[in-house]
Each structure stands twice: as C-alpha cells, then as structure tokens.
Amino acid sequence: MILVTGATGHVGSELVRRLAAAGEPVRAMTRRPAKARFPVGAEAVYGDAADPESLAAAFAGVDGAFLMSAQAVGTAPEPTHDLALAAAAERAGVRRVVKLSTLDGGTDDDPIARWQRTAEAAVTDPARGFAWTLLRPGRFMSNALQWAGQLRAGDEVAIPFADRPAASIDPADLAEIAALALTTGEHAGVVHELSGPQSLTPTEELAVLGEILGRDLRVRSVPVEAARAGMSLPHSGLRSSGGTPIGFPPEVVDAIMRRTLDGDRGSEVLPTVEKVLGRPARTFAQWARAHAEEFPRP
Ligand SMILES: NC(=O)c1ccc[n+]([C@@H]2O[C@H](COP(=O)([O-])OP(=O)(O)OC[C@H]3O[C@@H](n4cnc5c(N)ncnc54)[C@H](OP(=O)(O)O)[C@@H]3O)[C@@H](O)[C@H]2O)c1
C-alpha cells in the first residue's frame, strides 16, 4: 500500500491519479476525506499532520509513502508536521519514503535553510531505516493559479517580482518521478534537484497563459514593500490550494527577500526530469493548456 500525503494538492493529486491508474494500491490522505474526490481505486483516509495521533491509522499497513508538508516555514519553532509524518512512517514500518522538499533549502544559515535541513533529516536519518528519495524542485507552474481570482475581475494581474525568471516545474512531472521512486525503489538514497525546461519570468508566463485563454493579459507591478507585506503574517492573504492561510514571520520574510533580491538557483534549468523520465520536462504552455479550465474566461 502506498500512502500519499497532500493528496488534494497539486503534486499529491497527480500522484494519486497516476498510481490508481497503474493499479497500485493507494491511500490518499486529507483532512476532509468526505469532501475530497479521488479516482476509483484510491482509498481516502483522514490524517492531519498537526494531530500526530491521527496519523497511525493513515500509515497502518503502508510500505511506501509520499510525504509533504504545508506548514509554512517559521510558523513553529521547528517543522513539526514533517517530524510527525516521518515518526508515523517509522512506527508503521514504512520502507520507501519520497519527501517533497524544495530547491531553496540550500546551505545558508538562515531560518529557511535550517527548517528545510531539519525536515529532510527527519527522513534521511539512517536510524529511521527508510529507503528515501528527496525531491527538491524550484518554483511550481501551478503558482500561476494564484492569478485566477484577479483574472475574474479583469485582464490585469498584480505580480510581485514579475521580471524575476525561474525555471518553474509542472507538479505532474514531480508526481511522475515520485511514482517511479515509490514503485521501483530505484531512486533510494538519491536527492533529485528539479526544474522545468525553460527559465521564464512571471510576465512571460502570463503572456503564454493569455495566448492560451485568448485574453490580452497585463502585469501590474507591485512595490517591494507591498510584496513584503503580502508575505507577512498575520494578514498575508496567501492561501494554499487546500484553502489554508499561509504567511511568514518577519525573519523568514527577510530571508525570502534576500534570496529574491540577491538571486537564487531558481532560474537554473536542470536536466533531472529528462534524465529520470527519458522525455523533456513539460513546458509552461503544456501546463497552462492542461489547466486552462481552472482560469476564468472573458
Ligand atoms: N509552490 C512552489 O513553488 C513550491 C516550490 C518548491 C517546493 N514546494 C513545496 O511543495 C509543497 C506544496 O505542495 P503542493 O503544491 O502539491 O500542495 P498544495 O497544492 O499547496 O496543497 C496543500 C496540501 O497540504 C495538505 N495539508 C494542509 N495542511 C495539512 C495538515 N495539517 N495535515 C496534513 N495535510 C495538510 C492539504 O490537504 P487537505 O487540505 O486536503 O487536508 C493539501 O493537499 C510544500 O511543501 C512546498 O514547500 C512548493
């Protein structure tokens, strides 16, 4: 049995679909199993990483697990959700673990790096005995869905750092690699640093999306201080696809701003997807065509 956490999210939902289609026994974890829609063959299970006791039933009888956390960096002294998920997997005797991490982890001694290191160590610690695989992607193409609300009101979208390029990745590519690692075990002990096939600015991504939607979309730039306020707790207004409010404390916002303004590795085009899957990584245009229905039409 393979357990997928974050099963209603961008990566997890693709992974559940892929595993169910391949006939793999798959269990999809969510905090709202009655509301979630999963494909035939997938079993929905309740689990909340903020409530470690709820995880025992979700992990029972599982031999492979996809672990992700939606806990925003710095909103607790340490990544308690990652720690709870890894501990539950160990208690249940899970063998294979694929952990969704981030390319931003880095080696810097800032609050983001410290958080990511602790979260990754929870699965790579040899004492746990997992055959682990780490996925470290940069920006997700699905972040463009954050524009959908503004596109309902008009053709202009306020985008912070709209001219900062990134080689964003399709979550479906991550799911395909996760499925391989969970079903073949060939990626044990491997850290995959991942990106999409081209480095585009959000302005360029918006132009591609506009062409696909048949709309003339424009960027409205956001002053740096407004971008900062937009990421900060308690009123960031940011939400995960699961609807959970997210926002960061000041020291984490400082670290994000430093990485953003000084540059990070997000614009590097990495060869990993093509190497692992034997085909090119999906482009932003492919992602946008596949998700066009999630954006409002004029
Ligand atoms: N977006 C990016 O650009 C980017 C880049 C690199 C790495 N990442 C990493 O990717 C991950 C996000 O993946 P995603 O985009 O697939 O997720 P997502 O679409 O944002 O969905 C969040 C998922 O987390 C689940 N969740 C929220 N709170 C939970 C809790 N307390 N216990 C258990 N599950 C909970 C939600 O499930 P329910 O609501 O159904 O319970 C939902 O399935 C994060 O770890 C992020 O750091 C993102």
Image (cartoon, rainbow, N blue to C red):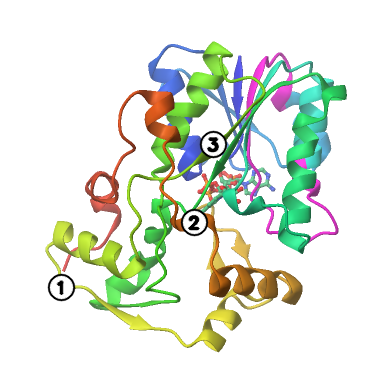
Q: Which residues are magenta?
A: 58-82
Q: Which residue is mark 2?
A: 266
Q: Residue 295 location, x and y as percent?
A: 28, 59
Cβ of mark 3 under 8 A from ligand 1 = yes
Residue at position x 76%, y 53% from top? 115
Q: Nearer the viewer, residue 249 or 165?
A: 165
Q: Is residue 93 left or right of residue 230?
A: right
Q: Nearer the viewer, residue 229 or 152?
A: 229
Q: Is residue 78 magenta?
A: yes
Q: Which mark is residue 216?
A: 1
Q: Which residue is mark 3?
A: 7
Q: Secondary structure at mark 3?
A: loop
The CA distance from mark 1 to mark 3 is 34 Å
Vertical arrangement, residue 194 with respect to residue 78, above or below: above
Q: Crowdedness of circle 1 by 10 Å Cα count: few (<14), some, many (20+)? A: few
The label nearer to you, 1 versus 3, is: 1
Which residue type carries mark 3? Ala
Which residue type carries mark 1? Asp
Query: Which quadrant would residue 144 be assigned to in this image?
Result: bottom left
Q: Nearer the viewer, residue 173 or 3?
A: 173
Q: Earlier in the sequence, mark 1 or mark 3?
A: 3
Question: Is residue 249 in view from this perspective?
Answer: yes
Query: Which quadrant would residue 276 be assigned to in this image?
Result: top left
Residue at position x 75%, y 35% from top? 85
Magenta-colored segment: predominant secondary structure: loop
Q: Is residue 151 left or right of residue 78?
A: left
Image quarter where the N terminus lies is top right
Question: Is residue 74 in view from this perspective?
Answer: no
